[in-house]
Amino acid sequence: MALLALDSAVLSALLALAVFRVPAWACLLCFTTYSERLRICQMFVGMRGPKLEECEEAFTAAFRGLSDTEIYYDERSHLHDAFTQMTHALQELAAAQGSFEVAFPDAAEKMKKVITQLKEAQACIPPCGLQEFARRFVCSGCYSRVCDLPLDCPVQDVTVIRGDQAMFSCFVNFQLPKEEITYSWKFAGGGLRTQDLSYFRDMPRAEGYLARIRPAQLTHRGTFSCVIKQDQRPLARLYFFLNVTGPPPRAETELQASFREVLRWGPRDAELIEPWRPSLGELLVRPEALTPSNLFLLAALGALASASATVLAWIFFRWYCSGN
């Protein structure tokens, strides 16, 4: 119900802005309705007469200081609740025969204090991405706006020696929502360095924010793209241009190379990215590898090692006792 009331107030505000073109008191328009404001003035000065128009003008004038107010988008409901409490307080003052000349400026000052206590939106962090935690609600138009940044991040260069491992980290420097975040990978081959989506094809084997290629070959030269989504809505697209250099490793003979090409013949070429499954050493060295599943695996290995040590100790003890 609160959300419906908030949406109704915003729609009424947009209509008033379109008709009367008075953005100076738009913050008041966004979170109260005309009927609410009129009702308050009628309680102060009566149903009709010149005082009623004077009251309405005083109401709008008191809140002109909030004309350029911007708040963190997720704080809209809190500000709406504060305006609702304000209207109730003004109605009580009117019922007690108070003066609107005093009540309106006092209410506006209290609203300014409420706004300063709201959680602030995060600053926009360039160079790219749809940054929801930086979304702001603009009172001058009753609308929201996000950072004026592109979805496409600049291409990052990755250079590896042929036969080595290439690893990509789909990481952005702004905060992501915690729910329903997915990662998908694409590849544009042929040595292309591009951000044109028409050149990319899906890499179905890649999943998660880390992916790797091993061993890297000359056919892997090109641009890899990672798309970060929340509930199918793109938040950022990262690009990695992989440049594979150098001759093949010394231990690799021509026969081995031919055998490897036979094994990779056919549709397996579309699966050149594989998910990163870290070794035990990588689990201990790289903090980002300690996912819940990897932590469970480490705990299981520790339990197995402890049980094995206990069994060996018991066998040794029985052997020692039987010898004596």
Image (spheres, rainbow, N blue to C red):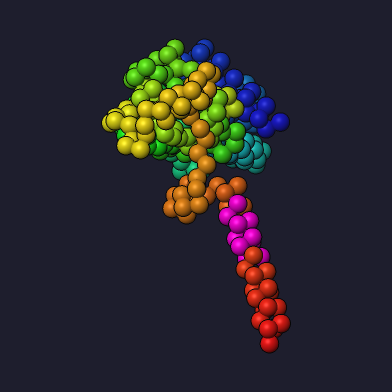
From where the camera sits, is residue 53 visible?
Answer: no
Give the percent coordinates (x, y) of residue 308: 64, 65
Residue 196, above or below 155? above
Give the percent coordinates (x, y) of residue 275: 52, 35
Q: Is residue 323 left or right of residue 63?
A: right
- Predominant secondary structure, magenta span: helix
Which stretch did the figure color magenta?
297-307
Quarter placement of the C terminus: bottom right
From where the camera sits, is residue 230 visible?
Answer: yes
Please state which of residues 180 and 277 is positioned toward the viewer in this rendering: 277
Please state which of residues 289 and 127 is positioned toward the viewer in this rendering: 289
Which residue lies at the image location 61% right of the left edge and 62% below the top edge?
A: 305
Quarter placement of the N terminus: top right
Which residue lies at the image location 42% right of the left edge and 24% below the top edge?
A: 258
The answer to if 320 sits in the magenta stretch is no
Give the percent coordinates (x, y) of residue 54: 51, 25
User: Quadrant of the rendered structure where residue 88 is?
Assistant: top right
User: In the image as oriented, which residue stretches furthest toward the bottom?
Assistant: 324
Which residue lies at the image location 40% right of the left edge and 37% below the top edge?
A: 165
